[in-house]
Image (cartoon, rainbow, N blue to C red):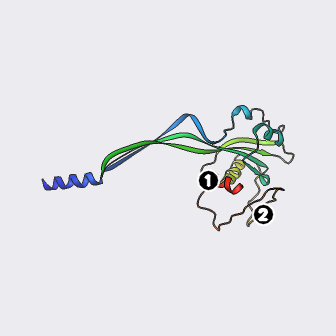
Amino acid sequence: MQRQVLATIILSITAAGCLLLPIPESNPKVVEGSRIQDTATSLIKPGITTRAQVIQKLGEPNLDMPELHLIAYSWAQTDYNLYWVAAGSAPPGIAGGELPMPQPHVFFVAFDQEERVLAFGVAKKGSRLIQEAARDWEQQEGLAVPPLPSGFVAHDVPSGQSVLYIYRQGGFPFVVPPEVRRIVAL
């Protein structure tokens, strides 16, 4: 009898459970930035539409990468929610909830030397830097991607603007949040 009581006590103290259930959103909600709609991109024609026309239609891009002849528009949207339930016995109880899982998306537009559209499309950025996602997207589109420089390269700074370079050997173990990027941009 004592063994059964002891076993029950040990089991109740250590027993726990957790259930995670990702459910796709039928209508993803934009939580940051502005999603580029299909209706806005229907007027973009490779080989015909110019860079100026794209910017006139979509507004100023979030990213301009002259070395790749590419601009990008980014946003985050909740593609799915994560529902969770956790149960435990020390202390006894059950809890649960819903976590929206925003995913970063990017609309890329690549141009030729004459500033005419070569290709365009949407990609999920994931946890990569947007510059890495841009290079990956261009490679997937079959576009020529110049190799990365082996050392530090300073970019030309437009008149009236400034650039802050932050270097950390080995890169950064995190992605800089948009709020910090906006503050640094000021």
Q: Look at mark 1 in the image and give the residue it sits on.
A: 177
Crowdedness near tag 2: few (<14), some (14–19) or many (≥20) residues, C-alpha within 10 Å: few
For the C terminus, give its image quadrant: bottom right
Residue 84 sits in which quadrant? top left
Q: Secondary structure at mark 1?
A: loop
Taking the image as drawn, is residue 83 in sight? Answer: no
Residue 94 percent across, percent down from the top left: 34, 44
Look at label 1 and name its amino acid: Pro
Residue sitting nearer the eye, 95 or 148: 95
Is label 2 in a helix, a strand or a loop?
Answer: loop
Q: Where does the image place residue 33, in percent across and percent down from the top left?
A: 66, 42
Residue at the (78%, 63%) spot, across then down? 154
Residue 136 is tagged as none
The answer to whether residue 59 of the structure is visible from this angle is yes
Q: Position of residue 106 (x, y in %)?
A: 67, 44
For residue 154, which numbered disc appears in the image? 2
Q: Amino acid at mark 2?
A: Ala
Vertical placement of 170 versus 23: above or below?
A: below
Residue 6 image position (x, y, % from top left): 19, 56
- Farthest right residue in view: 114
